[in-house]
Image (cartoon, grey):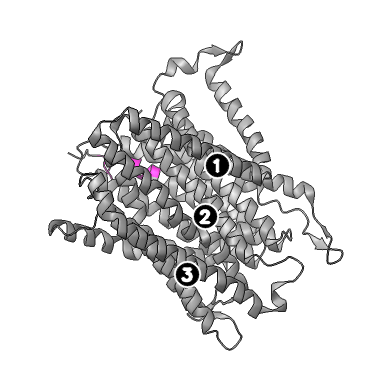
Amino acid sequence: MPGQQDVLGHPPGLFVCFATEMWERFSFYGMKFLLLLYLTKYHLFSDVQGLSVLGSYAALVYATPIIGGLIADRYLGMRKAVVAGGLLLVCGHLGMAWEGHAAYRTDAEHIVRDETALQVFYLSLALIVVGVGFLKPNISTIVGKLYAPADHRRDAGFTIFYMGINIGAFLATILCGYLGETYGWKYGFGVAGLGMLLGLITFLRGQRHLHGLAEPPHPELLDKAVLGSMRLESVIYLCALLGVGVTWQLVQLHTAVGIGLNLLSIVVLLGLAWFITYRCDADERGKMTVLVILIVSSVVFWSLFEQSAASMTLFADRIVDRHFLGLHWTASQFGSLNSMFIFLCAPGFAWLWSTLGRRGREPSVPVKFALGTMLAGLGFGALVLGSHYPVASGQVAAIWLVLAYLLHTTGELCLSPVGLSAVTRLAVPRVVGVMMGTWFLASAYSELVAVQLAKLAAIPAQSGVGQNIANAAAAYADLFTFLLSVGCGFGLFLLLVTPLLNRIARGSAKD
């Protein structure tokens, strides 16, 4: 039964987490869709250089929560981890508000950049990467701790929490995108930093509502002396700062990030193959095999979906006529469409799956993955179609980009929540955490694949897009045609092998 102090039928701690995550996502998405534009338009990076930085940063952002979750589970506890992550995020986002001097060309071959400003920028990215690693996995875990396992309010609580994420993302891309591209990059990044500061203050003031559920599992360990007289807790924070230093270099060493993720992925896949072969019975082996196949296939979807902050943002900036609904939109503001369509479409998808489930006609997980991947491909089909019917200026009408985001979001709703559910149901209980980490590792890997795909339409820095919109549009049309083929082709392949996957999993792939 809800207690007297419940808010709207839920523990007050839920709304503390809701507000904290809303502002954290506000800060994250506020800078995400500005990042590539800032590098290519202010520091005059080539498309290839800017995409490399974006890929390294995004891949590391998805990889570090695995480490942050382990540290919180074993030592810090979730509350301390969230506070540490919040502090790092505030420093990182506010650091990005320092622009330095804009780059300029001395001739067609030479560019003068403010190297000090760039190093501050890279350091800020590193602070954000490590901060997300501490905060992102643990704020979600706290929400789960607020409810007893059998509490009927749990799913509704997570739905409210998920809406906070999308509210933050929607507001950020609208506000930060407008300020950054209209008045100056520092204003967009600065507002994102202030959002994270509000989130940290909210969490600190609301800690009493967590009722000790997020404290360290073994507090005495944190006081244990290590490395001489230093407390273990201090050593953990020191290691986090050292991790910032390492990440500072990694975001500039794009090849090293790619090699590292490739090696890690190979090790994980070989380890899982060994575990499935020698440590699982026949039933477990079937479920785990299907789960690994689904996780690997998710790389295709996310590589398409994450074009939003890469090729699609450059496309919106360079090729799209951004006058829409009587307003002039900035390129980064189009990123808000994903969150808006989640608001509009998520209830319909929940109703659809429930209705089909009651009638025994709900698609299996592989079918949903196939549908999601094909919808992502069809989103690029909308952009290809729009490129064939330009407006009078030679640009592509904004409605085609809106349609692409709608299709991508419906694809996300087919795949993302279903994938997380599949991990918890198909994984052998003793390795659920490992498989969840593998799911996020696949997301990290897809970020690198996404930027490599986006580079197929990279515009040479010397040519300038404005010189020939038609040629630039043709380059993006070729890329989007290829992505259309990849999405629809791979989705069709998943549909064809679905009967086999369902047999391997012995029918367990049903939601």
The kind of residue on which mark 1 rests is Asn
Dot placed on the residue nearer the N-terminal end, 2 or 1? 2
Dot placed on the residue nearer the N-terminal end, 2 or 3? 2
Q: Quadrant of the N terminus?
A: top left
Magenta-drawn segment: 5-17
The residue carrying mark 2 is: 29
- CB of mark 2 within 8 Å of CB of mark 3? no
Q: Is residue 439 magenta?
A: no
| Residue 26 to residue 380: above or below | above
Residue 202 placement, left or right of 249: left
Mark 3 is surrounded, within 10 Å at the Cα level, by few (under 14), some (14 to 19) or many (20 or more) other residues, namely many
**Which residue lies most toward the left here?**
359
Choose mark 1 or mark 3, whichever is in front: 1
Mark 2 is surrounded, within 10 Å at the Cα level, by few (under 14), some (14 to 19) or many (20 or more) other residues, namely many
On the question of residue 205 being in view, the answer is no
The residue carrying mark 1 is: 262
On the question of residue 442 being in view, the answer is yes
